[in-house]
């Protein structure tokens, strides 16, 4: 039997699959069930200082090979979220707290609160593509990113993950600015749009949204490969993973662990067991004992 | 997004209308669609007729439902679906227990073998009570303007429920909880259709989850045993921001 356990930024995971931020992770009971049904860990919905209702629906549109979403960073505010994390933690697996803000001070404040809630790691949302003043707008400013990461690292002891955006002109520059983080999470959604031709209007109430699902997998593979090759840092791969073979592809590009989100739409919560089973079968067939034997093996030159 | 024309409209109560449309699609009782009003919003709606010409029955309570109710025959209706699971068909006599517009998702179950406890705030708001024969309808109103004054449980107490092969229940969660608590431990089979805030309809946004189950995908219909195990049922729910509040 191959060993499919994984290690990222010092976190021990029973398998390489983590629930991605933004999908089924606002209610503590849901996060617990996702872990009970196969995920090794979860990343919470991105949480800010203040409560936000998000955009009015439609916040999601089905498109070819994926989903387009603009939920609008809906969240109850950090003070109300401790209760959900407490429920999620009863699964006995790592919970990673995702946070978003527009200033260094708010980011530090949120990270410290998350650590107090007993999370196993903090993920920085530097990449939400659809809310003014947050996400990519922060994450495309290299000096701001460097300051956010540097200041948070001084204040918390759990691992820090920087989730970066593909919607920038030079991701490597941002990755280097965030190099004090313990690991990168690549990639967030790709900015996109869908128009209903009968209504002659954009489907999403926010008009623009983020594209996820198998449509963006080649984009994710490319960034994981490039950033791993250039920085050598640990990476969590995310973007269009629906099968174990997609997962292996990300690992060969340089990922040490993986996140799954949109595939829950196609396969339901059993997707974690499904993908883990296929990873296991591939490793058995290829006579690979441990996942780290495959990390970055496709990188050359 | 599916786009059809509204072919008919019927005023049901002062705040509730039924919109009819042709849609060549197999839909089961209890399933729903996400209805989109461009520039206004998108809301989940149960199908109130699932055979032949389809229909939705809408109550005005917010901007989107108000705009939907203002549609007239000839107007376009945009929606996606059908989504969710459905009520399990049962042989023999069945009892429908509906509160307010909860009757909309129970309406496809109306047959020669069905009786109903229909409840509303007052007589004018009773929905689909005129679809049943006289001896098969039990009306309940908050103010006593028709039938029993009180809650559906007040009516159920006086009934022999074991003669029904199945009870189908839909309405506000407080009512569902009260009916569940009354039925629990009795020798009856029952299914409940739950309603929560719903944003995506496809099992990813977590707005409608109860105890880790997504109403839009695992539900909205659950049997009495499953619903009885849910710690959030009738106790707490999440707002549109994800804040946990008491029901």
Image: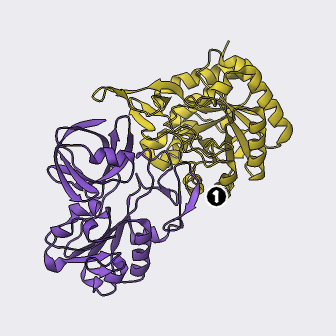
Above or below for A218 versus B226: above
Residue B163, percent from left and from top:
24, 83
Chain B pictured colour: purple
Q: Residue at x 44, y 69 (%)?
A: B174
In the rendered view, tell whether residue B184 sits above or below residue B226: below
Q: Chain of mark 1?
A: A
Which residue ends up furthest to the top in the rendered image?
A301
Disc 1: which residue:
A91
**x, y (%) of residue B156?**
32, 82
Q: Is residue A9 visible?
A: no
Taking the view exactly as shown, the residue that stands out farthest to the right is A154
Q: Position of residue B221 (x, y in %)?
A: 36, 61
State left or right for residue A229 relative to residue A132. right
Which quadrant would the N terminus of chain B be assigned to in this image?
A: top left
Residue A291 or A242: which is nearer the viewer?
A: A242
Labels in figure, total: 1
What residue is at 66 percent from the left and 30 percent from the top? A126
Q: Secondary structure at mark 1?
A: loop
Residue B2, picture quadrant: top left
Colour yellow belongs to chain: A
Q: Is residue A85 visible?
A: yes
> Residue at (20%, 43%) from the top-left corner?
B72
């Amino acid at each position: 039997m191959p060993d499919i356990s994984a290690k990222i930024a010092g976190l021990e995971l029973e398998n390489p699959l983590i629930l991605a931020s933004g999908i089924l992770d606002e209610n503590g009971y849901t996060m617990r069930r996702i872990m009970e049904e196969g995920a090794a860990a979860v990343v919470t919905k991105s949480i800010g200082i203040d409560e936000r209702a998000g955009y009015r629906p439609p916040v999601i549109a089905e498109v070819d090979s994926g989903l387009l979403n603009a939920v609008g960073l809906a969240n109850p505010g950090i003070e109300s979220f401790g209760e959900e994390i407490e429920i999620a933690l009863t699964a006995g697996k790592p919970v990673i707290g995702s946070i978003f803000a527009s200033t260094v001070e708010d980011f530090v404040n949120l990270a410290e609160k998350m650590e107090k809630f007993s999370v196993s790691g903090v993920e920085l949302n530097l990449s939400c593509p659809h809310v003014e003043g947050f996400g990519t707008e922060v994450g495309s400013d290299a000096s701001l990113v460097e300051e956010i990461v540097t200041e948070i690292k001084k204040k918390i002891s759990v691992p820090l993950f920087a989730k970066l955006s593909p919607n920038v002109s030079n991701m490597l520059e941002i990755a280097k600015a965030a190099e004090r983080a313990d690991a990168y999470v690549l990639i967030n959604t790709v900015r996109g749009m869908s128009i209903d031709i009968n209504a002659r209007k954009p489907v999403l109430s926010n008009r623009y949204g983020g594209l996820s699902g198998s449509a963006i997998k080649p984009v994710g593979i490319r960034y994981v490969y490039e950033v791993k090759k250039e920085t050598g840092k640990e990476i969590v791969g995310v973007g269009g993973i629906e099968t174990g073979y997609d997962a292996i592809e990300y690992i060969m590009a340089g990922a040490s662990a993986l996140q799954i989100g949109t595939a829950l739409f196609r396969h339901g919560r059993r997707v974690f067991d499904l993908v883990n089973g296929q990873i296991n079968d591939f490793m058995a067939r290829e006579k690979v004992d441990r996942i780290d034997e495959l990390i970055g093996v496709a990188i050359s030159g | 997004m599916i786009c059809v024309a509204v072919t008919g409209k019927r005023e049901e109560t002062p705040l509730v209308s039924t919109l009819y449309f042709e849609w060549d699609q197999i839909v089961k009782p209890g399933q729903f669609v996400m209805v989109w009003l461009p520039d206004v919003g998108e809301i989940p709606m149960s199908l109130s007729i699932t055979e032949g010409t389809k229909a939705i029955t809408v109550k005005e309570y917010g901007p989107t439902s108000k705009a939907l109710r203002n549609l007239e025959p000839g107007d376009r209706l945009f929606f996606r679906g059908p989504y969710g699971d459905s009520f399990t068909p049962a042989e023999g006599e069945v009892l429908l227990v509906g509160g307010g517009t909860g009757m909309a998702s129970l309406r496809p179950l109306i047959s020669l073998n069905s009786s109903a406890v229909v409840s509303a705030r007052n007589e004018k708001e009773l929905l689909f009570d005129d679809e049943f024969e006289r001896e098969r309808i039990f009306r309940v109103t908050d103010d006593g303007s028709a039938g029993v004054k009180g809650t559906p449980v007040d009516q159920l107490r006086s009934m022999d429920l074991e003669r029904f092969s199945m009870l189908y229940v839909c309405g506000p969660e407080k009512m569902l909880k009260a009916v569940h608590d009354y039925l629990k431990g009795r020798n009856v089979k029952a299914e409940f259709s739950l309603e929560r805030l719903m944003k995506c309809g496809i099992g990813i946004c977590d707005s409608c989850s109860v105890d880790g189950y997504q109403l839009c995908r695992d539900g909205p219909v659950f049997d009495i045993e499953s619903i009885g195990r849910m710690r959030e049922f009738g106790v707490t729910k999440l707002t549109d921001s994800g804040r946990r509040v008491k029901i």
